[in-house]
Image: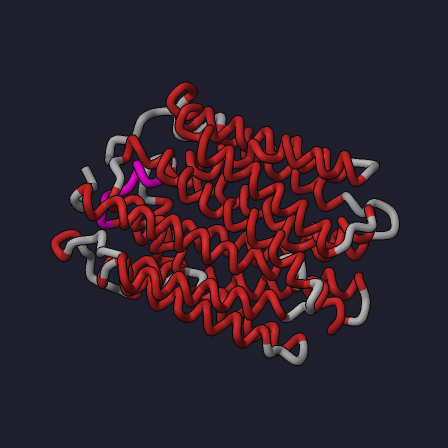
Amino acid sequence: MSIHLSPSRMRPAIAFILVTALLDVMAMGLIIPVLPTLVEEFAGSTASAGIWNGALIAIWAGMQFLCSPVIGALSDHYGRRPVILISTAGLAMDWVLMALAPDLWWLAVGRLIGGITSSSFTAVFAYMADITAPEGRARAYGLVGAAFAAGFVAGPALGGVLGEWGPRVPFWVAAGLSACAFLYGWLVLPESLPPERRMAFTWARANPLGALRLLRSHNDLTGLAAINFLLYFAHHVFSAIYVLYAGHRYGLGTFEVGLLLAGAGLLDMAVQGLLVGPVARRLGDRRTMIVGLTGGAFGLLAMGIAPTAWLFAAALLLNALWGLAMPTLQALMTARVAENEQGQLQGANNSVASIAGIASPLFFGWVYSLSIGTLPGLGFVIAAAVLLGGALLGLFVARARPATG
């Protein structure tokens, strides 16, 4: 049993984690409709913007790769609360920096800092593992995923509206939202990891390679980590080319793309907040994960071949099944490590995701720049194949219940 907070303290703790996830992701969602536009303004062409946008995302992911294990190990040693609060405050300052950016290099510095501060999600997931029993973690991570999705509902929609006033306005609003998350957490967040369950900080655990060793030391974790990599690799097709593709192929503007992304977030919120728990209880975590990966793959394929904007938008319905995969994948992994390794596990997971985040945007940006004149949807088709590969791998891993947890 991993729960040590009393019910009267657990409710505000869970509420904070969900509100923090909502505000932080909403802040990131705000800039999605406008950042590619700002990059294109600085780069001078759509093709160059695809490459630059991929490079900026890769910079962000590179810092996640380096810093997520450090954040996870620090949270195992000092507790989750200080790590979450410091990271959230740093994210607010990063949005201010990007709002003032005069060129692409300034944006690159902002993405570098943002990659460090956004590593707080490592501690957020470890916090949820601290306060929930293993059998309830799929639902708990589903709630966090639903909060993420809610942020992507409100963020892109509001960002599309604010972007009509200027591409820098959403950055200022994002800074305000992150500042609100910091102040809220300062007032209400209790610590979830008591001193007797903490682990000493060592660089052997905190460096990315040391953190990744954990994934080789437990049954099934290596295969599950590979699925995690494929999931994130496919997912970055959205951040790398979605906005540019929707504008080029279907003539959609900032406002329309913001509404589409908001709709995707709304569907994801419904799947993760309402469906994950019941479906996982009926099918089990592993089968639910496979169903989610398969549905997401066919949704991506539909996006890549849709001949009209309406069919492109309708493909989001099928793609929403993807929301079943992440919470159940997280639950499968956390059940296979000890309680004082949860922070290290989340750091290792973020490192895997960051490796995908470095390679994937560069890859999809490159594919888009080459195929824009002939097969502009090729990136989505490739992403579908990658995600289907994750579903097939899921057939061979995590078949038995873990011995730990």
- Say which quadrant the N terminus sits in: top left
Rendered location of residue 198, percent (x, y): 18, 56
Left or right of 361 on screen, residue 67: left
Left or right of 307 on screen, residue 239: left
Task: Decide whether residue 339 is among the magenta residues.
Answer: yes
Rendered location of residue 33, percent (x, y): 66, 57
Left or right of 33 on screen, residue 358: left
Task: Decide whether residue 237 is among the magenta residues.
Answer: no
Farthest right residue in view: 373
Magenta segment? 332-340
Left or right of 39 on screen, residue 285: left
- Say which quadrant the C terminus sits in: top left
* Residue occupying image coordinates x 76% and y 44%: 378
Rendered location of residue 252, percent (x, y): 78, 50
* Residue occupying image coordinates x 22% and y 52%: 192
Rendered location of residue 254, percent (x, y): 72, 56
* Residue occupying image coordinates x 49% and y 54%: 25
Give the colouring mode of the picture. secondary structure
* Residue occupying image coordinates x 19% and y 45%: 8
Is residue 213 in view from this perspective?
no
Relative vertical location of residue 301 with respect to residue 283 in this rendering, above or below: below
Is residue 279 in view from this perspective?
yes
